[in-house]
Amino acid sequence: MIARIKGTVLESTPLLVVLEAGGVGYEVHIPITTAEKVPAIGGECSLFIHSVYREDSATLYGFASRDDRDFYRLLIEKVSGIGPKTGISMLSRMSTDLLRSAIASSDVALLSKCPGIGKKTAERLIIELKDKVGLGTSSSGAASSIGAAMSAAQPSAFQDAVASLMTLGYKPADADKLVRKATSKLSAEATVEALIREALA
């Protein structure tokens, strides 16, 4: 079982990266939220891996943090109807922190905006994972600081700020990205208004 790959970026697209490690090129499927953190071709990259082995194939899925990888495993292993590709699509549309927040607050409407997730699957997500998700459990780098800011005070402020940007016409992924950046710059007590102002700055 491959748990982590650290190597040189040979190829990179929004949903796929090829890493060379030990003379072997590994093709790794990634969500857009991880692609944002992959360095340029020739740079060194480390990804946490989830492996899916079938009779006729072996597929690697990579994530920038252990927390993202573990949350992905929860999605595909605990919720019927969510397979590896749907899980990647969900993490491409929204960050782990936003998905956790939506599950914790039973936000069916927000979860339903993910590709391949209808109302019934969103409700199943909430039922299966609400007692398993925790806000702010990220374990590395920027993800840890963002998670800490969310869990320290107002996870609802993060979600409300994202929702507000979406009402202004931003796509969920773009709104999420902007508010994540704002959260990393402001204090844990930042209000919804402060997050929105910083996101739009």
Image (tube, rainbow, N blue to C red):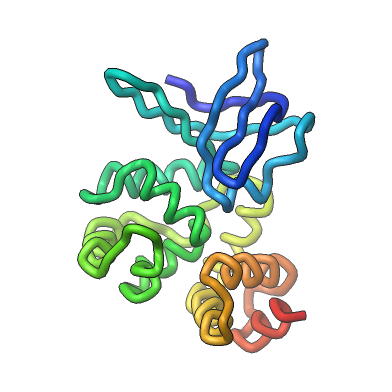
Query: Is 81 in front, or is 66?
Result: 81
- Looking at the image, residue 15 lies above or below residue 108: above
- Residue displayed at 23% across by 50% down: 81
Q: Is residue 81 above or below residue 56?
A: below
Residue 186: where, in percent of width, then height?
Answer: 72, 73
Q: Is residue 51 left or right of residue 108?
A: right
State the image coordinates of residue 187 (x, y, percent, origin top left): 69, 74
87 shown above or below 168: above
- Answer left or right for 123 relative to 97: left
User: What residue lies at 43% left-to-right and 56% top-to-bottom?
Assistant: 90
- At 36% from the left edge and 41% from the top edge, which residue is drawn? 84
- The N terminus lies in quadrant: top left
Query: Which residue is rendered at x = 49% and y = 56% of the image?
Result: 96
Nearer-the-camera pick, 181 or 84: 84
Residue 101 in the image: above or below residue 74: below
Q: Is residue 11 left or right of residue 42?
A: left
Nearer-the-camera pick, 146 or 151? 146
Screen quadrant of the C terminus: bottom right
Q: Tell me: 77 left or right of 189.
A: left
Coordinates of residue 7 in the picture (x, y in percent): 68, 24
Count the numbered circles shown. Answer: 0
Q: Residue furthest top?
A: 23
Estimate the x, y position of residue 119 in percent, counting from the top left: 25, 69
